[in-house]
Amino acid sequence: MDKRAKLVLNADNELKKHFSEINGGLTEELSHIEEKPNKEVKTAFNQLKKQVLEKNHPHTLKNPFSNLTSHFLYQPFGSQNYPDFLVFIFDHVVGIEIKFSKNDKGEKNLQTSRPMWNSNLPKPNAIYLYGVANANITFFKGSDILSYETREILLKYFDTLDKDEESLKNALKDLENPFGFAPYTRKAYEHKKEFSNHHQIESFFSPNHILREQNVLEFLKTLTR
């Protein structure tokens, strides 16, 4: 078992201490817990799914179910999709995502280690657990490492590229191009020093990580009151 799998397993075990995992046929299990027809439960869950996967939903999600108050789902939308855990806490729903970096240098590499985001920016209403092999683990809310306004601009950049691709197709449609040559743009986000408004890129393990972790704990307290 690799170290990321162990981190996920540890998170799973910790959740099981306080929450009930929902297994088996999702719709049937939710219907049984909610004591409502399958169709009604499926509709509510699909609406929740849209909110969970929304790229810039600024608020904590409301729990559409009345009996799911201490439950969680593991990889509810597949192993390659956010989130790793979907947790139902009283009146709210929170996504938890596990990030992991390999590391051969131990503590020496800790300050420059950063998660891979691929095409998904950190979501403002999600909690992230970030582990660096042989070094340390931290956790934070998406809203504490990327503001709503900055996220909006970054998301619109790729929206603009999508529109430009349509313009390119229209420009080429009547021209000879039997081999279908086209530009390839991989939609992914990374950390670049020239985009940071600090002297250097903020480390996920800088002294500020303590405050970010405290913010998560305070946030969770508001959900359990």
Image: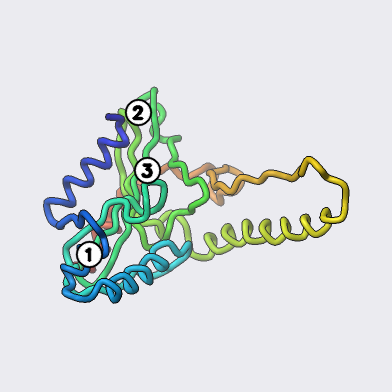
Residue 9 versus residue 140: which sits nearer the camera?
9
Residue at the image position 78 percent from the left and 55 percent from the top:
168
Q: What element carries label 2?
A: helix
Mark 1, other Cα within 10 Å: few <14 / some 14–19 / many ≥20: some
Relative to 150, residue 108 above or below: above
Q: Which percent across, then down, holds residue 31?
A: 21, 69
Q: What element carries label 3?
A: strand
Residue 99 versus residue 179: which sits nearer the camera?
179
Disc ID at residue 107: 2
In primary-sequence order, the first of circles 3 and 2 is: 3
* Label 3 – label 2 distance at C-alpha: 18 Å
Visual colour scheme = rainbow
Comparing labels 2 and 1, the label whose residue is closer to the camera: 1
Q: Which percent across, then down, holds residue 188?
A: 56, 47
Disc ID at residue 99: 3
Q: Which percent across, then down, holds residue 84?
A: 32, 50
Viewport quadrant of the C terminus = bottom left
Relative to 219, residue 189 above or below: above
Q: How many marks?
A: 3
Can residue 185 be seen?
A: yes
Residue at the image position 29 percent from the left and 53 percent from the top:
85
Relative side of 115 to 23, left or right:
right
The residue that label 1 is drawn on is: 28
Amino acid identity at mark 2:
Glu
Viewport quadrant of the N terminus = top left
Relative to 156, residue 208 above or below: above
